[in-house]
Image (cartoon, rainbow, N blue to C red):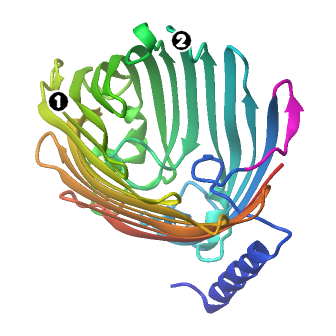
Amino acid sequence: MTQPANTSRAWCLLATLAMLASWPAFGQAEPPTFRGSPERGGNGLKVGNGRLHLTFDFETRYDSAAGYFPPPGNVDPTAVSDQLSGEAVMHIRPGLKLELPGSRLDVDFKGYADYVHYTGLFAPGSTNTSRVEALADLGITYDREAPIGVELMDHLQRSDQTSSVALGAGVLSLYNEAQLKVPIRPGGGAFEVTPQLAWGLEHFKATGALRPIGCDGPECDPALVSTFDYSNVRAGLNARWRFLPKTAVVMDTDFNVRTYAEGGTPTALLMHARAGLSGLVTPKISVTATLGWGKDFGTVAASSLLAQLEANYLLSQTASIKAGYSRTLEPVAYLGMFRDDRGYMEAQALLGGRLSVRGLASFDRLSFEGDRRDTIFKLDIGPQYQFEKWLIVGAGYLLGVRSSSMSGAGINYSRHEGYVRVSVVY
């Protein structure tokens, strides 16, 4: 049970930071994932034909399922609770953004380091678990408009948001994927085919030392989290034929070789193939519809229908709403393969040129090989306001509800998060 003094301190902290966030000398933006933020303008340091922007985010957040923390009075940071605990968390994110356009070569880099500080206001033993997370995106494009171009990309991220859906809360992920694309546009660009090759690695680390109560599987054992580490090599071919000015036939195929360094999970040899249409139905409605098949040629030999149906409605020049459904088939350690049936809806609007609001809801039903079935519901809503070109303030609420046919606190929980964020971009 939270002590009254700690509770009052937490609310005072949140209230003070909320007032600072609304004071004209400070600002907030989407954290430097650099998505959805209003135009920054021409600030920054001049670098050749481009600019280097320095960024800084400060965020305070309450997370009702922040992690597994040492019990009060415990001096051993490895002896942590087997139950998720709520905590007030601070994020301090210095970063930078480089935009370097050229006549033939474009370079784009975005990245930040994120110091995650657990304040100890609700769980006094949490401070010792503070850590550093990070994100970096690099894109290099050569001959963007030429008949044959080259695109090289790399994505690096360390966070507690893992791509492995078999694992629950309380896991850190270090992920990196390098990707090479060669767009080929013969005959003016109506037809485009893009061979691509990617190599990804992901390493997992448990934040706690004990199993969550009631969960006996390897996905809940901190000592076995590293057996989910994998290497994934993906070769693919995308094609697009624009047979009308704003409508195209699309095709997407790829072959994945997923290997696991530990744990004895067999190598997955997974092929995806999809085809369909993408384009405008009316001046305000665009639709993407694809259908395909996924097949594992490895030991598991799973297969599934693949599909995507997405519609985007342009309410006005500054507001839109998107809804869709997708089905995918992906590999995972121990459990072999899983099918993800996902429905989602997203809306966003820019009001008065400075205030933007957004909302996102999604529901995933995960069907693993065997008897395990999971569901994940996510809700993300919030506004942000641009005071200056270099200054944005925002707030938000996130809800995550996960349930599984397996027992265990780490894969059955509800997570409430509220935050205030201040960002400055030079």
The residue at 61%/58% (across/down) is 76
Camera sees residue 319: yes
Q: Amino acid at mark 1?
A: Gly
Camera sees residue 63: no
Q: Position of residue 139 (x, y in %)?
A: 61, 26
Residue 140: in magenta span: no
Q: Position of residue 380 (x, y in %)?
A: 45, 64
Q: Amino acid at mark 2?
A: Gly
Q: Earlier in the sequence, mark 1 or mark 2?
A: 2
Marks 1 & 2, CB-CB < 8 Å contact: no
The residue at 13%/29% (across/down) is 302
Question: Which residue is situated farthest in the bottom direction here?
Answer: 4
> Quick check: 173 above or below 297?
below
Residue 42: in magenta span: yes
Q: Which residue is mark 1?
A: 292
Judge by depth and name the residue closer to the eye, 352 or 1: 352
> Quick check: 139 above or below 401?
above
Q: Which residue is mark 2?
A: 149
Judge by depth and name the residue closer to the eye, 223 or 24: 24
Judge by depth and name the residue closer to the eye, 110 or 226: 110
The residue at 81%/34% (across/down) is 51
Q: Position of residue 329 (x, y in %)?
A: 22, 35
Q: Which residues are magenta?
A: 40-49
Residue 122's image quarter?
A: bottom right
